[in-house]
Each structure stands twice: as structure tokens, then as C-alpha cells.
Image: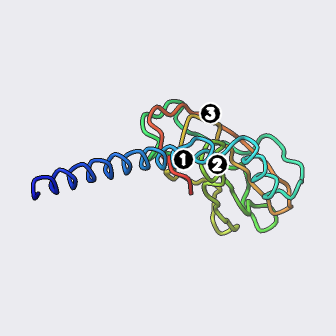
Amino acid sequence: MKNHHNLFIQKSRRIFLASLGKMSLLTAGAWFSSSLAFAKKEDAAEAIQKITGGAAIKDGRVTLVIPPLVENGNLVVLKVGVQSPMTVDNYVKVIHVIAEGNPLPNIFTAYLTPRSGTANITTRVRLADSQTVWAIAQMSDGSFWRGSAETLVTLSACTEAV
């Protein structure tokens, strides 16, 4: 009788563990679904629209430098520079960096004043995938300028939905 009871417990445990494994695979599949994890170009365009309020964006004045090939997307060096005299009457107010393929497209925003001296920023960011990255600068006169760079990421970061 005792041996029959142990067989029942072992069989129940196997069924439970098999069910648990199937549920984990389904949950992991939903969690790592590319539709949940990565933004789309439309999301980046929407983020830029919110930043500019629909104002025209001019090309130029903004230089964005990212390595064209990145082995690991966890720490990508990114440099943004905006041509500006940085005087009281003419300076860069804000620099936004938008990554088309990250879970949240607006990856950082930097606020500047004439006292910043120059409009040059170097930082490290996480990039989820190969993509175009945009830098949008708002000037003190209300105008918007942009620059972009493309990068190929071989090992992605930011793979979970936020």
C-alpha cells in the first residue's frame, strides 16, 4: 500500500512539473515577444512629434556619433554635439535622443543653459537592436534641429518590455 502511494506522488509531481514547464515557456514567449519588447518607427515618430509639438525640424547643426558596429548593446558610447554660440541670446535649451528600436524610444534628455559653455554631451546608452538613433535639439529661439546615426548591434540589450 505504501509503495502504491509513493508511485502516485511521483506521478503527480511529474505531471505538475511538466505543466509548470509548459506554462513557463508560454509566459517566456509572451514576455520576450518582439511586439512587446521593441518600439517601432511609428513610436519614435510619435515621441519626436510630442517633443516638437508638430513644429518643423531642420536637418543640420546636430552631430550624433555612435559606432557603426556595436558588439554589445548594453554600453554604447554616444556623442551629441550641436553647433551653437551658447550665448544668452542663442543657445541650445534641450537635446533629446530617440532610439527607434528600444522599448521606450526617448532614451535620454539633456537640459542646457548658456552657462553650459558648449552643447556637447558624451554618455553611454543601451540599445536593444540595430537601428537609427536620432538627436533632436531645441534652440532658445524655439527652432528644432536634428541629426541621426545608424548602428548595427550584434548582441542586443533592453530585451524586456518595460
The picture quadrant where one finds residue 130 is top right
The three-letter code of the residue at mark 3 reads Glu
- Given the current orientation, which residue lies at the most extreme front position? 1
Residue type highlighted by circle 2: Gly
Q: Quadrant of the C terminus?
A: bottom right
- Residue matched to label 3: 150
Residue 132: x %, y % from top left: 65, 37
Picture residue at 69% right of the left edge, 68% below the top: 113
Quarter the N terminus occupies: bottom left
Which residue position holds label 1? 30
Upstream in the sequence, badge 2 or badge 3? Answer: 2
Q: Nearer the viewer, residue 54 or 1?
A: 1
Q: Earlier in the sequence, mark 3 or mark 1?
A: 1
Q: Earlier in the sequence, mark 1 or mark 2?
A: 1
Q: Secondary structure at mark 2?
A: strand
Q: What residue is rendered at 48% in x and 45% in y?
A: 26
Q: Residues within 10 Å of mark 1 (few under 14, many from 20)?
A: some
Task: Please tell me whether mark 3 sits on a helix, a strand or a loop.
Answer: strand
Could you give the CA–CA distance between mark 1 and mark 2, rounded to whole angstroms?
Answer: 39 Å
Horizontal side of 42 relative to 99 (left or right) equals right
Question: Residue most toward the left?
Answer: 2
Q: What kind of residue is marked 1?
A: Ala
What's the CA distance linking mark 2 and mark 3? 16 Å
